[in-house]
Amino acid sequence: MTGWSTHDIPDRSGRRAVVTGANSGLGFVVARELARRGAGVVLACRSEARGSRALARLHAEVPGADAEVRRLDLGDLASVREFAATLPYERVDLLVNNAGVMALPYGTTADGFETQFGVNHLGHFALTGLLMPALLAAPGARIVTVSSFMHVLANIDPRDLNSERRYRRWVAYARSKSANLLFTHELARRLAAHGADVVAAAAHPGYAATNLQTAGPRAEGRRLAERVVRLGNRVVAQSAEAGALPVLYAATAPGVRPDAFVGPSFAMWRGAPAPSWRAPWTLDDRAAERLWAASEELTGVAYDGL
């Protein structure tokens, strides 16, 4: 992986990709680079207005790109179902579960789930399950779920998945990112048992400068905290372009193994894509199975055949 860059992305012509949260940050860079390599890209965005602006920018940077915007609100299972039901493609070669929220004040989704767990994990769990027939129809398809090195702060609590007993924003965020890795672990196992030609992997951007970090302080009107975060993004973080490289590697590089976790090479912080350390609890088979069962029950989405 040493020195791997966007120049190493293989040709994606004839392939269809869905990227959630593609209106800005990592998601936009991933969608743009896939389109630059010939993929047809669906920008799945909660805000149609922001999605349309991102699409215009993408077309300006990649003239002739095969790209479109479709509305997807991962905090509303009705929106997830509508997105999947109206996507007019019989096969999807790549699903990038990128969208997310971080360290928000306590809130709930349209379906009553704690926001970070609901958006970061349950929304993507439901989306992946609903798109599974189209993914299984595409030989060599991949599912890449974006986690975070911050997952190391907390394992999921199976007795309190929605943080109803006690809410601590950073713990809730870490739990949602551990859930992303447990989901990938169990999904990879089920795909292998099914003999499916689909690879499920995970990636993280290290510390990349995006608007994810400022959303929490902004939502609470904590202007000083927002300014501090912006300063950190400018001084310490790597760019969104650099942060997107592990995601693009997991999505396109030859030889990516099921349940791989790709991140920046230097201390999980920055640098070229490399295999990333992950907390042992994210490889716990029993915990992954329990989370899967709970996720099916909460979302009402069953992975038929897996």
Image (cartoon, grey):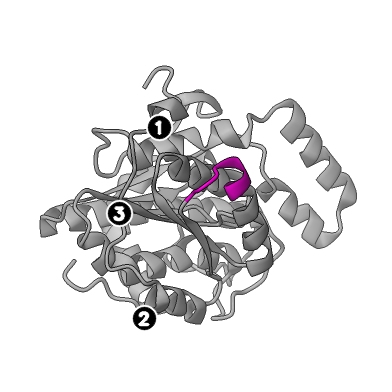
Q: 54 above or below 88?
A: above
Tag 3 secondary structure: loop
Q: 274 above or below 195?
A: above
Tag 2 secondary structure: loop
Q: Residue at x 58, y 72 (%)?
A: 164
Residue tagged by mark 1? 277
As drawn, is 140 to the left or to the right of 63?
left
Q: Amino acid at mark 3?
A: Asp
How far, Cα to Cα, is label 1 from label 2?
Answer: 32 Å
As drawn, is 286 to the left or to the right of 60?
left
The stretch drawn in magenta includes residue 248 = no
Q: Earlier in the sequence, mark 3 or mark 1?
A: 3
Q: Earlier in the sequence, mark 2 or mark 3?
A: 3
Q: Along the line of sight, which residue is nearer the eye, 284 or 59?
A: 59
Q: Earlier in the sequence, mark 1 or mark 2?
A: 1
Q: 123 above or below 18?
A: below
Residue tagged by mark 3? 93
